[in-house]
Amino acid sequence: MPETNMPSNNRIALLRNTDIFRDLPDEELLRLSARMIERSYPPNHAIVREGAAGDAMFIIVDGKVEIRKRDPENNDLDVTITSLGDGAVFGEIALLTGNPRTATVMAIGNTKVLVLSKDDFDILLHEHQSLSIALSRIVAERIEEMKNRESPGTVSLNTLKHDEAIMACVPEQLVRKNKILPTSYANGKITLAVVDTRNVTAIDEIKRMVQQKYPKVFFDLVVVNEDDFLKFMDAEYKGLVHPQGDEALDIESFIDSMDHIQSDILKEFAFEEGSDDDLGIPDIEKEAEGAPIIKLTNSIIAMALKKGASDIHIEPMEKEVRVRYRIDGDLHEEMVLPKKIQLPLISRVKIISKLDITERRMPQDGRITIRMGNKSVDFRVSTVPAKFGEKICTRILDKTNTTLGLDKLISHPPVLGIVREMIKKPYGIIYVTGPTGSGKSTTLYSALAEINDVKRNISTVEDPIEYDLRGVNQIQVNHDIGLDFARVLRAFLRQDPDVILVGETRDMETAKIAVEAALTGHLVFTTLHANDAPGTFMRLTEMGIEPFLVSASIIGVVAQRLIRKICQNCKQPYEDPAALQFLGLPPGTTLYKGKGCDVCGKSGVKGRIGVYEVLNVDEQIRHLIAEGADTLAIRDAALAGGMVSLKEYCLILLKEGAISVEELLRTVVVQS
């Protein structure tokens, strides 16, 4: 932890006010002051932990801590014994006895302490008899206190943080019956205020109820006095908790009033001078739970849905916060917000994504799910630390897309027929290639949807699970516990699978197991990063997969891109002989482009369509792969066998009037 410098006079005054050191002479206090080190701790950081070695004692210079012990009757809960503030001392008994720490001391705000090591403490005990007497008196007082205490130390409910959404998780009738109230969420834990810690059954019931809304959270137990609990329920509770939770995203009603919402919301903020770094976590949490920030976050999400965005980017700049949407493949700036909104806005998104708002130095991944009538939309949230603060990218995953089917994705019937023949094969491997955001996952899910029936055992391993597929066993990768693609794949082979989907082939181990699965009678789908279909084989060779294994296992490759469509509302024909000659099209071919209208936002394009290059591996190509032939030879053989290249597919769409020349040139490389 960072060390700071506190004036020696202030240190001496602090030491003189403690029970232990008040009898020491000034010159010895000065020597003691020189031995002590200052340390600062952020909120929700453990200064010492229960069971750790007692190798130092601490004096609180500024801040507040809680003393917590593990509940002996329920190991999932921590009991808050008491709280300590400025000038309090802790850790001296462990130094005196030499035993491990008997409790955890947690900073609940920005806390600064003075630390005295065991070696310096032993020297003081040896040199000053008055210090030994003071310690003996303190030990005796604590023993007497423990004898008179019938239950763990209690805290006042009014001193705890109150979070309306957390408290509303449990009905008032059940709270009053069991005298247990969830009060707030911080650092991955929910605080439970409990009158009787021995009521384990009721505590477990409340935990299960809370976890229905907040899965995978942990709990801290705080003991409160019964009279204090009842007074709080009769007074403050009714004013805090309302029937609805504050995290409800009423998207349908919100979308109808989008036009002036940004200016209306910003009027509710009161901006003050000062640095964002001056705000502690409790202050940020309070701002993030305020009505204006909740409205702003909901409006950003609702506007993205209204405009058909695929991604939301919240990007901290030097003096402002930029919000951009990716619509039809291009990013558009939607809002530029004041810098003061940055921390509350990012914290709000992290809260509803179940992320740790105290962690700003490491990337995090989370997920939000909302419902709009019968429609369910997932948001995959990713945070990364950038120069001017945390950047958030949110991928919008509309689950209804998985019901479209391959015929809604692949518009050219001959190519669609080849893909459908490929996915009907009983075993082998099919690779889908393309850059990030090219629709590979949608193609894979649509393929699975066409062959999904009760007679097939279909399993997927994904990172993350983007869509829910009915009747399919979907596994989420978890690298933190060693659950990677390769490990799940090995487990799948013991689960009697018919079809296996691997979200992405990233390394040699995953690629090899996928090939082996295809060779042993399973149909395998997976994605791979390659520029085109013939380039897939060179990519696999670079990953260390032997060419003969690839040739023996592969069914085919689908390479794809997404390209923007001409707006059908303002579509108009035109002639461009030079473009026709460059593209190799017959003279007189009609070209189309969008003029720009209100429907497409004056851009001339609306929506996107897939461009596909499907390589169906025949015997000739299989021999070339086994021999380690280069990409050009495989491409020539595939084209001779009837493969439609990405360029040719684009030209088909161009002649149909679906795309413009400009979009074709943006998507594929064209050589004249």
Image (tube, rainbow, N blue to C red):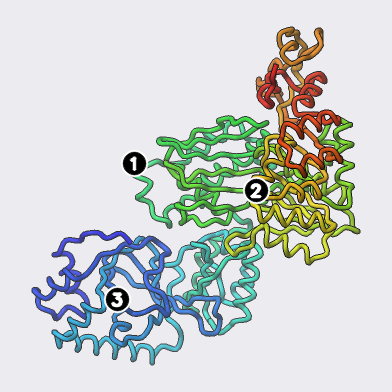
Q: Residue at x 53, y 33 (%)?
A: 335
Q: Is residue 572 visible?
A: yes
Badge 1 crowding class, 10 Å Cα cut-off, few under 14, some 14 to 19, many 20 or more, is few
How far from the left and from the top, in percent, is residue 188? Answer: 52, 63
Determine which residue is flagged by label 2. 543
Amino acid type of the residue tagged 2 in the rendering = Met
Left or right of 313 on screen, residue 13? left
Determine which residue is flagged by label 1. 273
Determine which residue is flagged by label 3. 56
Left or right of 373 on screen, residue 2? left
Amino acid type of the residue tagged 3 in the rendering = Ala
Compared with 117, 330 (above or below) is: above
> Sequence-wise, which precedes: disc 2 or disc 1?
1
Q: CA distance from mark 2 to mark 3?
A: 53 Å
Compared with 269, 200 (above or below) is: below
Badge 3 crowding class, 10 Å Cα cut-off, few under 14, some 14 to 19, many 20 or more, is some
